[in-house]
Image (spheres, rainbow, N blue to C red):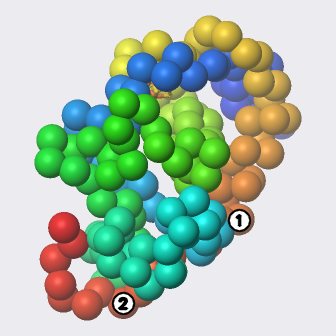
Amino acid sequence: MPKKPFYSEGLYFSCARCSACCRYERGYVFLSKADVQSLVQACKMEYGHFVQVYCRWVPMGDGNERLSLREKAGFDCIFWSDGCTVYRNRPLQCRTFPFWASVLSSQAAWKTAQSGCPGMGQGEFHSGEEIEACLAEQQEEKLISRKNSGVRGV
Ligand code: SF4
């Protein structure tokens, strides 16, 4: 019988709204069509104009590039201003942290991520089933990508 993942009995997490994962360090927030549509609504902008103003294309090293949110100088998320300014419409990647495949790949990976996030290991209980559903939702989500255009992402 395959070994159960370490999170099968559930994990504790409540965001402490410290903003550490939204600021200070370079990172990517990859977007699906649903993410962009939701943000377009929040920003009351046209889809194409939104992509031009708030997004960048990131080369993935496999001949493709993915659409990500831009960052401000100093690596703050483009939507960070004394907190998340699009919190209700934030992308799935933000909504599902820390229940990402990379963070849940092992207890050691969870512990490493925990050292940078005061919300992990405290607060609300999330069952193993809930975590699995969260992982499945991310797997099903089709991120926006295209063939590498040769233009460097900014
Ligand atoms: S680092 Fe953790 S506690 Fe801080 S904002 Fe991000 S998810 Fe919330």
Closer to the camera, 72 or 25? Answer: 72
Say the numbered circle drawn on residue 140: 1
Task: Answer yes or no: disc 2 within 8 Å of ligand 1.
Answer: no
Say the numbered circle drawn on residue 147: 2
* Circle 1: element type: helix
Q: Residue at x 45, y 61 (%)?
A: 30
Image coordinates for residue 60, horizontal then vertical, percent:
32, 71
Closer to the camera, 139 or 57? Answer: 57
Q: Is residue 112 visible?
A: no
Q: Sequence-wise, which precedes: disc 2 or disc 1?
A: 1
Q: Residue at x 26, y 53 (%)?
A: 71
Q: Is residue 34 visible?
A: yes
Q: On the image, which quarter does residue 96 sit in?
A: top right
Closer to the camera, 99 or 5? Answer: 99
Q: On the image, which quarter does residue 68 sit in?
A: bottom left
Image coordinates for residue 95, horizontal then vertical, percent:
61, 43
